[in-house]
């Protein structure tokens, strides 16, 4: 009989201990504010529990470790950066880590920047790791916002951006107009990068594409200022001089015929769509109109009038600025 009582007492004690442990895992945590905890790869369960306790997320590292060993959840915890809401219970803390729901960060590659600028942006981000073995080809990264977890390799962002560009360019090329004066999606990407550099107004992109396409069909030089600047200094935004337009290099579309040899930046979806499906116009020229857009022309005479208006407007603006100073 005494033996049975001892067994029963032991079972009851185990049940009570399990109940208390379960209760401890369900009550609110001690932290009054949202708290972020970083768990390095290879950290033991004991180390994780201690880290959480020192951060004030759990009350007892001993109870936390005991409960996770008892349930087997401790074997499923994943390293990472975790953001816990105020008063998260030990069960919520453990479940978040077991699911690997670590914090997502973001990085944005903006339309029109060069690949060198995009890579520099990745290099400056201290949450990413690793280096890039080679510089990606110009134009090969799709501009977008990419989410990642702390410690993700920079090469993974590059791979995702290149995959996105390949997919989007392929889809646009499949839907392209039938009479384009270029034969490959790579050439369309070159033109898309030029369109991206010429205008920030989405409503103009298809019409600017039409100007370039019409000039290509006639064998006219494209005469795009951004291509000249790219061939001289890809990451510069300075103004061009007349002497610059005469400089001989492979991207100077005032001197070469046809498209330049590579893209001059990373174009967005709208510019890619414009390059593959340009508007149907007779336009051969465009120049800034002073209000953020462009004035288009079908003849050189009309274009020269537009240029004269732009120069007069720019002169008046500079005079007004000088008086204000």
Image (cartoon, rainbow, N blue to C red):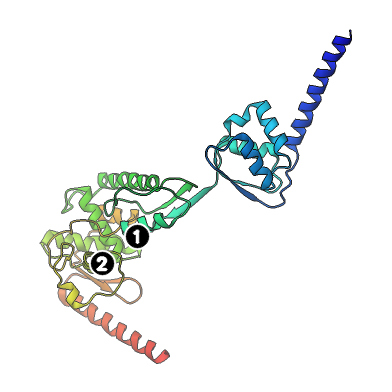
Residue 304 in view, yes or no: yes
Name of the residue lying farthest toward the right: 1
Q: Residue at x 70, y 40 (%)?
A: 89
In the rendered structure, the answer to whether residue 287 lies left or right of residue 102 reads left
| Nearer to the camera, 13 or 250 | 13
| Nearer to the camera, 118 or 295 | 118
Q: Is residue 170 above or below residue 225?
A: above
Dot 2 crowding, Cα within 10 Å, few <14, some 14–19, many 20+:
few
Q: Which residue is mark 1?
A: 117
Q: Is residue 302 above or below residue 144?
A: below
| Nearer to the camera, 132 or 54 | 54
- How far is disc 2 from disc 1 in space, using C-alphas? 12 Å
Q: Residue at x 34, y 55 (%)?
A: 268
Q: Which residue is mark 2?
A: 233
In the rendered structure, the answer to whether residue 80 lies left or right of residue 305 reads right
Q: Position of residue 184 (x, y in %)?
A: 19, 48
Q: Count how many numbered circles sit on residues in the image.
A: 2
Name the quadrant containing residue 300.
Answer: bottom left
Name of the residue lying farthest toward the bottom: 323
Q: Position of residue 290 (x, y in %)?
A: 33, 77
Classify mark 2: helix, strand or loop. loop
Classify mark 1: helix, strand or loop. helix
Q: Is residue 277 above or below residue 220?
A: above
Q: Position of residue 90 (x, y in %)?
A: 69, 38
């Amino acid at each position: 009989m005494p033996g049975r009582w001892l067994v029963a007492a032991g079972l009851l004690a185990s049940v009570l201990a399990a109940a208390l442990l379960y209760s401890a895992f369900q009550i609110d945590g001690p932290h009054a504010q949202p708290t972020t905890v970083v768990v390095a790869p290879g950290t033991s369960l004991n180390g994780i529990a201690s880290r959480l306790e020192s951060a004030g997320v759990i009350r007892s590292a001993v109870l936390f470790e005991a409960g996770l060993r008892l349930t087997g959840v401790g074997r499923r915890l994943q390293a990472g950066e975790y953001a816990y809401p105020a008063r998260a219970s030990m069960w919520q803390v453990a479940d978040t880590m077991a699911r690997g729901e670590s914090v997502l960060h973001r990085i944005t590659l903006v339309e029109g920047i060069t690949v060198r600028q995009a890579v520099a942006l990745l290099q400056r981000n201290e949450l990413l790791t690793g280096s890039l073995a080679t510089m990606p080809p110009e134009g090969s990264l799709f501009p977008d916002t990419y989410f990642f977890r702390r410690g993700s390799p920079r090469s993974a962002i590059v791979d995702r951006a290149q995959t996105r560009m390949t997919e989007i360019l392929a889809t646009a090329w499949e839907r392209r107009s039938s009479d384009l004066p270029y034969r490959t999606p790579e050439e369309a990407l070159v033109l898309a990068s030029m369109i991206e550099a010429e205008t920030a107004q989405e409503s103009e992109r298809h019409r600017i594409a039409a100007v370039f396409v019409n000039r290509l069909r006639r064998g006219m030089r494209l005469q795009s200022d951004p291509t000249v600047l790219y061939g001289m200094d890809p990451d510069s935004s300075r103004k061009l001089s007349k002497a610059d337009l005469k400089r001989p290099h492979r991207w100077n579309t005032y001197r070469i015929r046809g498209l330049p040899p590579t893209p001059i930046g990373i174009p967005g979806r709208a510019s890619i769509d414009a390059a593959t499906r340009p508007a149907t116009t007779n336009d051969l020229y465009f120049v800034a109109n002073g209000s953020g857009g462009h004035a288009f022309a079908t003849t050189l005479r009309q274009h020269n009038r537009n240029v004269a208006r732009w120069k007069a407007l720019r002169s008046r603006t500079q005079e007004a600025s000088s008086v204000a100073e």
